[in-house]
Every structure is written in C-alpha cells, then in structure tokens.
Amino acid sequence: VALRHAILSALSRGIPKNGYELNAVFNDNDERAWNASPSQVYSELTKMEKVGLIEVSDRTERRATSYAITEAGRAEIERWLTQDEPDHTIRDDVTMRLLTMWTLDDTTARHLIEAEITFQRRRERALRNKLQTFEQLAEDTRVWRNRRAVHILWLTQTTTTIAWLEGLIDVLENPESSVDDTLAAALSPHVLPA
Amino acid sequence: VALRHAILSALSRGIPKNGYELNAVFNDNDERAWNASPSQVYSELTKMEKVGLIEVSDRTERRATSYAITEAGRAEIERWLTQDEPDHTIRDDVTMRLLTMWTLDDTTARHLIEAEITFQRRRERALRNKLQTFEQLAEDTRVWRNRRAVHILWLTQTTTTIAWLEGLIDVLENPESSVDDTLAAALSPHVLPA
DNA sequence: CTTGTCATGTAAAAGGTTACATGATTAG
DNA sequence: CTAATCATGTAACCTTTTACATGACAAG
C-alpha cells in the first residue's frame, strides 16, 4: 500500500479534498514526494472509503465528492510512520539518463543537459513561489513549519542540481581537466567542501 | 519500458554481466538511479534477449548466464535518450514520511529523524568509498568521468540532506523560532544562501 | 557436512499507466 | 454558444513485488 499513504498524508491536515484536487497534487512534477495517475487516485479513494480510512465529507458543491480523513485513517498514518520500515528505493529516470549520457557524443549530451537545466530552473521558480504563498497562510503552525521545511530541502536540492548540471557542461568542455575540481568549482557558490 | 533501460545502461560499458550481478546493482539502496527485484530482472533479461537488445556472451563459468549489449541495444539507448521525454515523476517514501511527520508528537518525530540521519550517514560513507574505488580503475575515461560526476552529485545531495535533517531537529526543539533561519543556519556550512 | 553465497527462476497478487468515455460548470 | 476547466470513472494492459522453490559451489 503506497498511494494510500500519500492520500492520507494529503488529507491529514484535516481539510477535505476531492479526487480532482488530489490529482492536482499527484500530477505536479515539482512535488518531490509522490506521483499518481488520475484513474489510480479515484479507484484508491473508493477502496479507502470502503475500509473506513476516509469518509465522504461533502457532495454538495457541484457534483464533486470531497473526502475527509477518519480516526482510523489517522491511526493508519501513525502505524505506517512508526511500524513500517522506510523504503529507500528510488526509480529516477532523469538520474539514469545522466548516468548513461557518456554513450552519446558531446553535442547531443550537451543538449540534454541544457534541457534539464531549463526544467530544473522552472522547478526552482515554482518552489520559491510556493514558499511565498505559505507565508500568507496562517493555518496551524505545526503543519506549515513542517511543509515549509520540506520545501526548503527541495529548493536546496534543486539549486544544487542546477549548479552541478552547469558544472557537468564544463566537464564535457574540458576533457583533460579533473572532474572533481571542475564540479567543486561549479558547486562552490552553493556547497562548501565537506 | 523502464527497467529495460536501466539494464541497457548497466551493460553499456561493454562489460557483460549476469542476472546476479545486475541484481547487486538494482538492490543497492545507495544507487540513486534504479531499483528492481531479482525476479523482475531475470524475466526482463529473457525478454530482452528475445528481442535482440542483449545476447548471451558467456555461459561457462559455473552456470551463470552473462549478457552483453548488442548493436540494437546501443541503438535503443540512443533512441531513448534523444527521442523520449525525460520522466520527472518521483515516488519517494522517505520524503512522504518527512512531509507527514508533524502528525506525530515531537519525541516520536525526533526518533524517526535520527533513524534517517543514521541511514544517510551510512550512504554517505558508501558513496565516498565508491568514489575512491573509481580512482583505482583506469578504464575508458569517458565512462568513469561521467560515473564519477553522478556520484559527486549523489554525495553532495546526501551531505545536504544530513545537514537539513539535523536542522529539522533544531526546528522541532525551538517551536518559536523561524524555520527559515534555523534551517539556513544548519545548511550554512554546506549551502550558501541563494 | 553444513552454512553462506552464488545463481536462476515460476506463479500469483498488487500497484500503476494509458486510452477512452462522459458530462457539468465557467469564462469569454 | 463554444472552449477550457472541473470532475469522475472503466477496461485493458504493463510493471513490480512477494512468496516460494531449486540447486551449485566454496569455506570452515
């Protein structure tokens, strides 16, 4: 059970959400926690209601069905976080591409890196925007302090990745230079040597 | 098709590998590119041989079946990297947990963070070791420069994550303080403000 | 001679994607 | 009135995990 916990997490703030709203979260590529397709979300919501982890809170507005987390749902979150071992496995298409790029010629590789820089810059802007909107919300501080902290991590990781990608272009352009030195120089405005 | 590209990537250096060796890569939680279970690897290898992306290179030693990448396999790598859009979706159990932690009391949350710090420190050591072994290998430089660069990214991300997790403990301990300032202080030895 | 590592697989179930279909509401 | 957005679902297919089974070889 996996998307299940992502949905419980999204509802854990207590604000009911419908399938469409949840899909907006799970199809957002800047959200670095979980992705899912719409059909999966709708069918998982139905199953979760059946077993009592969530309940229909509001069907009035339009025809949207909003769900709220139940006590059983909150108990399941706690069980998940405290009893289950964290799953550290990752499947990251982008990283796999970066690892395999040396099979291409320099020009093609460079194009791919530049496209990725463009994507990461867009993500960087999106994360900064989200952090700003958090400032305007005066909900339960506990929730928001936590969300804010995670977004700061995401932003830091993104900024570092951009610097690294720029360094990678330098590495390509200087085939004789030391990879370590070139990347250290590119990362230095962001990361000091450990 | 996804594991398929991870296998092609692993074989792209030209060194044949058997299922067991590939599984060692795909079950290594420090490898931040792709994970897969043994049974999936074996069945995917059979399928890939059938369509000619890989070929049996050596069945002699013990009864292990080693596979090598074919020309068609190399062509598929190039098609994948240049024609397919990168998939930026992520499913990360650990990040989801970090996002949901505020639902727990501070003591429990702290335990979870500390367990994660332990894990990340182990990964940090493992990555440093791998980088050292790279130095002793004098294979095709193009391959190793690329691998080295990716491992430097992984190491940087891991170091930053550890600093952030330590900052997160400070955030828990000082509920009145600014999340931004506390995390900036924790990250400052590693990351300068953008 | 037995425990651990190497090595491969099968079968069933769970998780996830894609293509398609449908219709209500809102903005221009 | 027409296009975009909101909103939900079904069916077929693909991907991945889990549980189980098997046996060779090496080291103590």
Image (spheres, coloured by chain):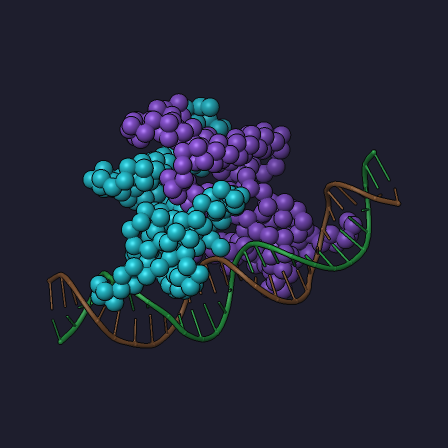
Chain colours: A cyan, B purple, C brown, D green
Horizontal side of A167 relative to C3 (left or right) equals: left
Q: Is residue B4 visible?
A: yes
Q: Quadrant of the C terminus of chain B?
A: top left
Residue A121: where, in percent of width, then height?
A: 31, 42
**What residue do we see at 25% from left, 67% from top?**
A63
Give the side of residue B185 with respect to residue B3, left or right: left
Residue at image coords 37%, 27%: B173
Q: Quadrant of residue C3?
A: top right
The structure residue drawn at horizontal position 59% and vertical position 46%, both measured from the top left corner, is: B27
User: Which quadrant would residue A123 be assigned to in this image?
Assistant: top left
- Residue B153, given in percent of the width and then of the height, sits at 46, 35
What residue is rendered at 45% in x and 36% in y? B108
Q: Is residue B165 above or below residue C4?
A: above
Q: Is residue A189 above or below residue B44?
A: above
Q: Give how far across and how far down residue B59 sits, in percent.
A: 75, 54
The x, y position of residue A84, in whole percent, is: 52, 45
Residue A79 shown left or right of residue A24 in the figure: right
Count of marks, rendered view: 0
Foreground pick, A133 / C28: A133
Q: Can you say whether B81 is above or below B171 in the image?
A: below
A18 and A126: which one is in front?
A18
Q: Is residue B71 left or right of residue A143?
A: right
Residue A96 appears anywhere in the view:
no
Q: Is residue B47 above or below residue B17?
A: below
